[in-house]
Image (tube, grey):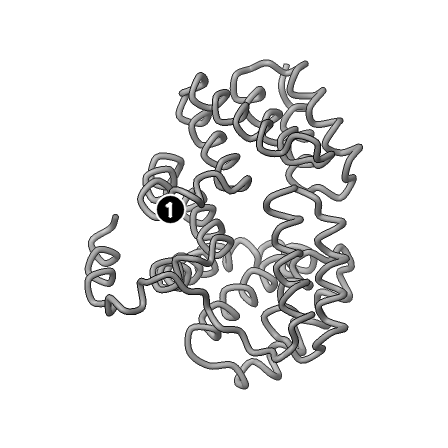
Amino acid sequence: MRPFASFLFLVIPFCTLVAQKLVLSTASDSCLYYYTMGWKHVMDEGDYTASEAAYRRMMKADPEFLVGMALLGRISNNAKERMAIEEVLNMRKDKIHGDERMLLDVYMQLLALTNARDKEPELATQLRETTFNLAERNLFRIAHAYPDDVYTKAEYFEVLHFRHGPAKALDSLRRLSSVQQRVNPFILGFAAELEAELGKYDEALSKASELKKLLDGKHVPKVHVVLGDIYLKMGRKSEASLEIEIALKLDPNNIDARRLKQRAAKMR
């Protein structure tokens, strides 16, 4: 951990570190159900289409749920809708406070970055460092204070990877994930990809094999995306391309598979 992170961990009261999740501002059980399902679809299964559908049902259950609205904005392929959501969030964000506001700020900043890429690429370049600095700081707090929020932890690990590389991300993943969370499909798959990036291909393929067994019987893109990523890092382009095409057939909207396909196209 970085020095500031170690210090902050020490000053967070022990009582906040017991098993718990961040309480969100909605009184609708249906809203929370579809919120969770949206995360499961996109993170555990790699099914962006199903995730977006869940988030839309979430917003029908509670149109005022701002954290959920931000997630819908992040996953939507409709640029006009994303920009409209960003405007609404900027107008209403002061209704949310505390740690939930910290989470909302991260999601809003990520949405703003996505919108900037469409409108002003130069602005997006300027926003990137500010966005991920905020994301690392806020998600660090939430990942430590609410250890049962596995998907918030997952995004924290992704931010660490983006900012500091695979070794840092993998170290934090091992330290912060509970035994149960280490067999969460996203955590397991991401660990496999990080191992591959570090050149530890046997470990990566072993974890991918665990993931395949875990998702046995589910026709979802996740394991194919993970294998495609690992094979690309190993230089096994033909095998990677096969896995990527399977993933895209299962979900044409899978952003990760699309990016892998672009990477594969640049390989000889």
Residue beneath the point at 45% across and 18% down: 201
Quadrant in the picture for residue 9: bottom left
Which residue is most to the bottom? 95
Residue beneath the point at 58% across and 33% down: 214
Q: Residue flagged by tag 1: what amino acid is it?
A: Ser
Q: Is residue 183 above or below residue 5?
A: above
For the C terminus, which image quadrant?
top right
Image coordinates for residue 253, horizontal then vertical, percent: 75, 44
Quadrant in the picture for residue 134: bottom left
Image coordinates for residue 98, horizontal then vertical, percent: 42, 78
Q: In this view, does 255 lie above or below 55?
A: above
Q: In this view, does 156 lie to the left or right of 8?
A: right
Image coordinates for residue 157, horizontal then vertical, percent: 43, 47
Q: 219 or 194: which is nearer to us?
A: 219
| Residue tagged 1 | 178
Residue beneath the point at 45% across and 49% down: 159
The 10 Å Cα crowd at callout 1, few under 14, some 14 to 19, many 20 or more, is: some
Query: What is the count of numbered marks?
Result: 1
Q: 7 or 187: which is nearer to us?
A: 187
Q: Is residue 222 left or right of residue 156?
A: right
Q: What element carries label 1?
A: loop
